[in-house]
Amino acid sequence: GAGVSQTPSNKVTEKGKYVELRCDPISGHTALYWYRQSLGQGPEFLIYFQGTGAADDSGLPNDRFFAVRPEGSVSTLKIQRTERGDSAVYLCASSQGGRSQETQYFGPGTRLLVL
Amino acid sequence: AQKVTQAQTEISVVEKEDVTLDCVYETRDTTYYLFWYKQPPSGELVFLIRRNSFDEQNEISGRYSWNFQKSTSSFNFTITASQVVDSAVYFCALSGLSSNTGKLIFGQGTTLQVKP
């Protein structure tokens, strides 16, 4: 079956602009996660959705970052007033039900570059 | 607090050598789960293995083996007879039951280069 997909694969924007990153999880997976991976680092948790609701957004760095999952499937990560420090790979993952013992399957990521 | 440490930043070996990637974790949870992921140059994280804190049996899958030791809070990964295709960044990750969300705490990763 299809895995997690993310679009766009690459995004170049200018400082101060608004960007949207999209994630399409594995069909039937109720749990969806966003992570951010800076160069040479491991992924860092941003936000977790269970169904349509954000069950844990403790990893969002500030209020410029926001994410939605209105129908419990596709999710969009939104970044306002982008800064150069936002440049990173944004990874999306999904799992069956969001429990700690479940395996998360990752998408290929969106590489964001803020000039 | 939960933490995962992969002290080896980069390892370089010659093909057919065995190599062990170290992972040390910290957690106050009594129930937790440990994972290894591979990130090849293409960038996508590929799941390799999951272990729970109650199962300390070592696991072998082909050329891959994992050694989980609760006494030293370690979950090390060994590749036997390494191949060039094993070249990638490898991440160890932890998920504690107390988080109630399944979010993963990753180590910094170990870059493995296997030379022909």
Image: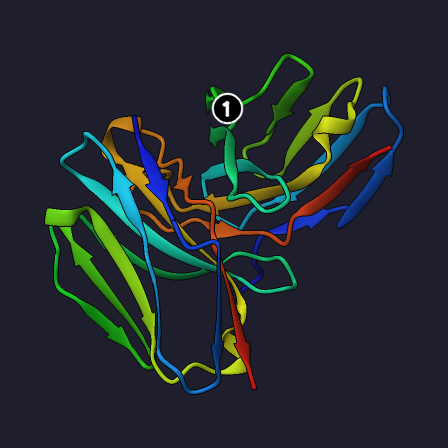
Percent position of residue A68, x then y:
62, 25
Q: Secondary structure at mark 1?
A: loop
Residue at (64% x, 20% y) in the render: A66
Image quadrant holding the C terminus of chain B, namely: bottom right
Left or right, A30 with respect to B59, comes to right
Which image quarter holds the N terminus of chain B?
Answer: top left
- What residue is at 15 percent from the left and 48 percent from the top? B72
| Residue shown at 59% from the left, 57% from the top | B44
Kindly identify the amino acid type of the residue bearing the numbered disc 1: Gly
Label 1 marks a residue whose chain is: A
Q: Position of residue B101 (x, y in %)?
A: 36, 31
How many numbered tags mark residues here? 1
The residue to which callout 1 is attached is A59
Report which quarter residue B68 is drawn in: bottom left
Left or right position of B45 against B97: right
Q: Residue at x 62, y 57 (%)?
A: B43
Where does the image place residue B6, in percent across and percent down from the top left? Answer: 38, 49
Q: Decide which of A29, B116 is in the foreground and name it.
A: B116
Colouring: rainbow
